[in-house]
Structures are given as C-alpha cells and as structure tokens.
Image: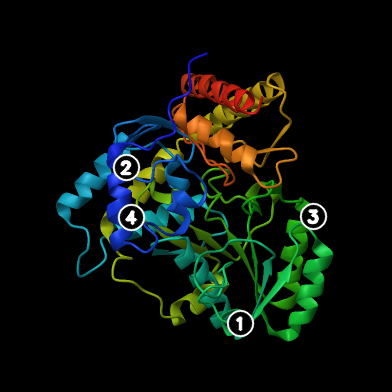
C-alpha cells in the first residue's frame, strides 16, 4: 500500500484557474466546472490518448469519463483521426455542405431501423430541440410530456435550473414519473387534444440517484400513448446512443421512436448532433427553420462517418460490455472487502457507484477524489462511461488504484 498523493493542485492548474476566474464567469461553467463537485479534480487537460488523459501539470489519468461521453473509441482513435485530417485538408466550414453529409446520413439511416431521414447539428440540446420543434410543426400541437428530473439539454424549454428561465419558457411541459405508466397516462389526459410529443430517455439517468433501466411495459405504454393521441414519440438517445445498441437503445425492446436525438458518441469527440425520424414527420422537419453557422462543418461529419463505420464492425459494444462487467464486479468485491456497502446501477457501459447511507454524497466524493489522486479520473455522482479502447489490462490497473482509494478513505475515517 503506497501513501496517497498530496491533495494540492499543481502549479499550472492553479495558475490557469486564477487566469480563468478573471475572464470566464465563475472560472468555468456548466458540467465541466469541477469546483462544483471536487477539490482535487483537475480543471484543465492538455492531451488524451486511448484511455489516458494528461492534465496541465503533466499528471496522467486512466479515464472513466470519456470526455463526459463523446469518446466511444478512445482518444485519438487512428481511423477517426485520419478521417479528420483528410477532411481538414480539403476544407471544413465551406459555403456549401460537404458530400460527406450525404454519405453519413445514408449510413446512419441504414444503421437505425426507425430512421428514414437524418439531420445534423452540433450537440444534444440542438438535437432534442429539433425533435420537439419538428413534432410541434408536424402535429400543430404544443404540449410535451417529459419525465420529472430528466435532462434533455440546457435550452430554456427543458432546463432543470431556474436561473434565467421563465415559467412561460416551460408552460407547455407536463411531467410524469419515469417507469410509471399511470402517471404518463394522467399527463396525456391533462394535455388533452394538444399533445405534440412524448419525450423520454432510454433509461433513467438523472444525476445524484441510481440509474434505472426502462421497464419494457412502460416503453410499450408510451408508444401506445403516442399512437393513440397522434403525438410523436421522441427518444432522447443523446447519452446512451451508440453505447447500448447501434440501432437505437430501445430497438432490443421492439419499441421504435418517431424521432431520435443523438449526440455524444456520434463522432468520437467531435462536435456533432443528429436527429433521425420517420417518413410521416419528414414534411414537418422540412418546414421548420433550424440552423447554425457551424452545423454543416465537414470535419465532424467525416469523424461521425468514420466512427460509425468502426462501430458497425461489431466489436466495440461487446468489448465495452466485457470490460464494464469486469469493472463492476471488481468494484463490488473491493467495497465489500473494505467494509463498504455500495450500489452500482445502469448498464455496465455507463456505470455509476454510490455508497449506501451517503445521503450528502460526502463519502462518494472523498472516494472519487482519492481515485483521482491515484490516477483514475471518475465522477462522484454523474455516471461514468466506458469506451472500446478500455482493455482488460486497463481495467485491472484501474481496479488496483480504486482498491487503494477505498483503503485511503477507510484510513481517513478511523
């Protein structure tokens, strides 16, 4: 057992934080504001390779966040990097869309059974907003059913934070409880004949709580509500897409959405979002006006095409299942050996770990910080992500370090 590294942030990290506070509100914002959840996680990273990250002070970490989800093949995957460089040499932001947009749309439609067409944007908020706007345009209705606590992006219509958001921004949202079909039926009844869409995530992945897999009967029930009311069923597959099933995360259930929002893992770290939809909503998608100066950039589309081609080889998801299972079993054994009761939930490709009785998350935060000091980058209460680049040997090394982290917190609490 080695002595845990010191808590102090590195010299470059400290200097960068000081500079950032002078020119960036709060020093950083959004989900990457590490000071909101940790005293020791580095804010600034300078490079990534495979499953390894290097911070501004040259410290290396085995990564379990994958850029908060976008990196599905590993940092600087050779095939994706080659596609990026090749396209960049031709051009990126041009006066017209690159032909690669058509190539990628064709492959995405060929991959996803519920897709007859595809549109591209930049991130998950873009994608969910396009879905909602398309549904409203196609149906001529306003109301949306959304699950309590579900994150669908940072735009005012769906923001979970109150600051800067008015009641009017969310006036047409009606909430239901995830996996509670009766509550969804009540919400649909409240919407009456003004229901444009039912919006749902493939599983419940709200922060600071156990993840919850979807009940197939609930998924089928939402499909029935949409069919009965003429509303669109929107699957927000931004977080889960391309990690659970390439065809769409609910395809194994036999429940197909009308519109699907994609992002995160689409382009292995490049800024890309997508919407796929069925033919009957094509005209609705044609009528809306959504755009952005950089939505049509060719480099992310080339990265998306290369990523999907690699994923379609069929080995990435089985690899993530294997290594994710290895990690989950190893962590369970370690926690028990050190006398801790923990809960791990959700798919093994997207794990999260909580300590029983840790209502204020202080113990989980201490353990996550101990892991970071040991060179494993993970989060105390947001789900983690596995990538196809994680090997059995990587997981074994991670487990060696997390075992030391359990020992660190056990000793600190004697």
Front position in the image: 121 or 286: 121
Check the image and name the residue furthest to the left: 89
Comparing 84 with 17, the one in front is: 17
Q: Residues within 10 Å of mark 1 (few under 14, many from 20)?
A: few
Closer to us: 58 or 138: 58
**Which x, y percent locates residue 90?**
16, 54
- What distance separates the C-alpha of mark 3 from that of mark 1? 33 Å
On residue 217, which mark appears? 3
Q: From the viewer's perspective, tell me whether residue 146 is left or right of residue 49.
A: right
Q: CA distance from mark 4 to mark 1?
A: 36 Å
Q: Secondary structure at mark 4?
A: helix
Q: Residue at x 44, y 78 (%)?
A: 286
In the rendered image of this protein, does residue 91 appear above or below residue 385? below
Give me the C-alpha separation between circle 4 and circle 2.
33 Å
Q: Residue 186 appears at what percent x and percent y?
A: 82, 73
Mark 4 or 1: the one toward you: 1
The residue labelled by disc 2 is 13
Say whether marks 4 and 2 touch (CB < 8 Å).
Answer: no
Image x and y of residue 67, in percent: 42, 45
Q: Residue at image x 47%, y 61%?
A: 124
Q: Which residue is mark 1?
A: 167
Q: Residues within 10 Å of mark 2 (few under 14, many from 20)?
A: some
Q: Earlier in the sequence, mark 3 or mark 4?
A: 3
For marks 2 and 3, the one nearer the N-term is 2
For marks 1 and 2 on the same chain, the one whose residue lies earlier in the sequence: 2
The quadrant in which the C terminus is found is top right
Say if mark 3 contacts mark 4, CB within 8 Å.
Answer: no
Q: Quadrant of residue 201?
A: bottom right
Vertical placement of residue 233 versus 106, above or below: below
Distance CA(mark 2)–CA(mark 3): 49 Å
Residue that numbered label 4 is attached to: 301
């Amino acid at each position: 057992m080695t002595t845990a590294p010191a808590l102090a942030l590195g010299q470059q990290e400290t200097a960068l934080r000081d500079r950032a506070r002078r020119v960036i509100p709060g020093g950083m914002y959004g989900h990457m504001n590490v000071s909101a959840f940790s005293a020791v996680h580095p804010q600034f990273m300078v490079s990534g390779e495979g499953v390894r990250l290097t911070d501004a002070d040259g410290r290396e970490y085995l990564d379990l966040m994958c850029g908060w989800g976008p990196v599905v093949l590993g940092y600087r995957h050779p095939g994706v990097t080659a596609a990026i460089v090749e396209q960049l040499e031709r051009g990126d932001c041009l006066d017209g869309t690159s032909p690669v947009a058509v190539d990628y749309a064709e492959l995405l439609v060929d991959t996803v059974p519920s897709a007859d067409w595809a549109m591209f944007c930049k991130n998950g908020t873009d994608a969910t907003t396009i879905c909602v706007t398309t549904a409203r345009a196609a149906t001529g209705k306003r109301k949306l059913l959304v699950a309590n606590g579900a994150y669908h992006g940072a735009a005012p219509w769906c923001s979970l934070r109150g600051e800067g958001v008015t009641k009017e921004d969310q006036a047409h949202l009606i909430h239901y409880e995830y996996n509670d079909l009766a509550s969804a039926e009540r919400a649909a009844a409240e919407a009456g004949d003004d229901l444009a869409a039912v919006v749902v995530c493939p599983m419940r992945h709200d922060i600071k709580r156990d993840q919850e897999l979807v009940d197939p009967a609930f998924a089928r029930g939402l499909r029935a509500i949409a069919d009965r009311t003429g509303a669109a069923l929107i699957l927000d597959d931004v977080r889960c897409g391309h990690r659970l099933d390439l065809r769409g995360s609910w395809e194994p259930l036999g429940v197909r959405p009308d519109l699907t929002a994609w992002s995160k893992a689409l382009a292995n770290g490049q800024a890309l979002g997508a919407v796929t939809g069925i033919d009957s909503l094509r005209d609705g998608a044609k009528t809306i006006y959504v755009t952005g100066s950089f939505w049509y950039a060719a480099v992310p589309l080339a990265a998306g095409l290369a990523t999907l081609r690699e994923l379609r080889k069929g080995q990435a998801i089985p690899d993530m299942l294997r290594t994710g299972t290895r990690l989950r079993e190893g962590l369970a054994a370690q926690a028990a050996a050190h006398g801790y009761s923990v809960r791990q939930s959700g798919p093994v490709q997207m794990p999260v770990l909580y300590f029983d009785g840790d209502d204020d998350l202080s113990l989980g935060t201490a353990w996550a910080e101990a892991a970071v000091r040991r060179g494993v980058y993970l989060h105390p209460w947001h789900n983690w992500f596995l990538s196809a680049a994680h090997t059995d040997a990587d997981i074994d090394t991670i487990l060696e370090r997390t075992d030391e982290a359990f020992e660190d917190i056990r000793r600190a609490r004697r």
